[in-house]
């Protein structure tokens, strides 16, 4: 189903009125706090993976960008995980962190993910569904 002209205009007006909400630059929120419960596990420090000179440059550029945007900051933590560059379908790279060893010592939270079938049922008779990519970080 495609949008009629009036519907397209309404969506355009909605996006324009909330323009500050839509940004190509990632940011932070203070509306939620998250902590990782590792119980009494000793800190895990994973050595960086060996990467090509080009990948090293890409990693350094991404880190500088994230520092400049304020979404990361220097840390003196005893915990460390390796960076992994994952290619996206469009040819760009996705900067990821391999938290496998951290996940192995993390106590699961008591709030399981909702069931997919129940979430889909909540959509009811919706004619249109939209997804946001949160500034392109996870596509």
Image: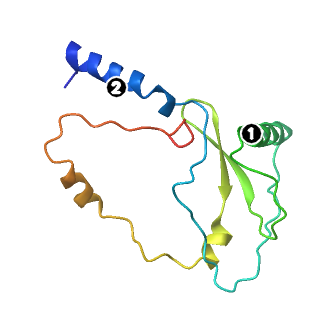
Rendered residue at 23%/60% (across/down): 118
Quarter assignment of residue 100: bottom right
Q: Position of residue 93 (x, y in %)?
A: 65, 37
Residue receiving disc 1 = 62
Q: Residues within 10 Å of mark 2 (few under 14, many from 20)?
A: few
Compared to residue 53, the image places residue 79 above or below, namely below
Compared to residue 13, the image places residue 125 above or below, namely below
Label 1: which secondary element: helix
Q: Residue furthest bottom?
A: 40
Q: Position of residue 35 (x, y in %)?
A: 60, 69
Rendered residue at 15%/48% (across/down): 124
Label 2: which secondary element: helix
Compared to residue 83, the image places residue 18 above or below, namely above
Is residue 120 or residue 54 the one in the foreground?
A: 120
Asked whether, in this view, residue 124 is left or right of residue 97, the answer is left
**Chosen colour scheme:** rainbow
Q: CA distance from mark 2 to mark 1?
A: 32 Å
Which badge, 2 or 1, is on the more N-terminal residue? 2
Q: Residues within 10 Å of mark 1 (few under 14, many from 20)?
A: some
Total marks shown come to 2
Quarter assignment of residue 42: bottom right
**Callout in the foreground (2, 1):** 2
Asked whether, in this view, residue 78 is left or right of residue 4, the answer is right
Rendered residue at 33%/36% (across/down): 130
Rendered residue at 57%/30% (across/down): 24
Q: Check the picture and name the quadrant holding the N terminus.
A: top left
Q: Position of residue 90 (x, y in %)?
A: 56, 29
Asked whether, in this view, residue 78 is left or right of residue 128, the answer is right
Q: Are marks 2 and 1 in contact (CB under 8 Å)?
A: no
Q: Residue furthest top?
A: 5
Residue receiving disc 2 = 14
């Amino acid at each position: 189903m495609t949008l009629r002209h009036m519907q397209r205009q309404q969506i355009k007006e909605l996006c324009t009125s909330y323009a500050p909400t839509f940004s190509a630059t990632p940011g932070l929120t203070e509306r939620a706090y998250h902590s990782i419960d590792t119980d009494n596990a000793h800190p895990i420090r994973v050595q960086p993976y060996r990467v090509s000179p080009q990948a090293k440059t890409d990693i350094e550029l991404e880190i500088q960008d994230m520092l400049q945007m304020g979404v990361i900051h220097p840390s003196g933590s005893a915990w460390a995980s390796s960076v992994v560059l994952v290619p996206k379908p469009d040819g760009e790279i996705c900067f990821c962190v391999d938290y496998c060893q951290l996940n192995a010592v993390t106590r699961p939270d008591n709030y399981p993910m909702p069931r997919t079938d129940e979430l889909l049922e909540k959509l009811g008779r919706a004619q249109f569904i939209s997804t946001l990519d949160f500034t392109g970080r996870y596509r």
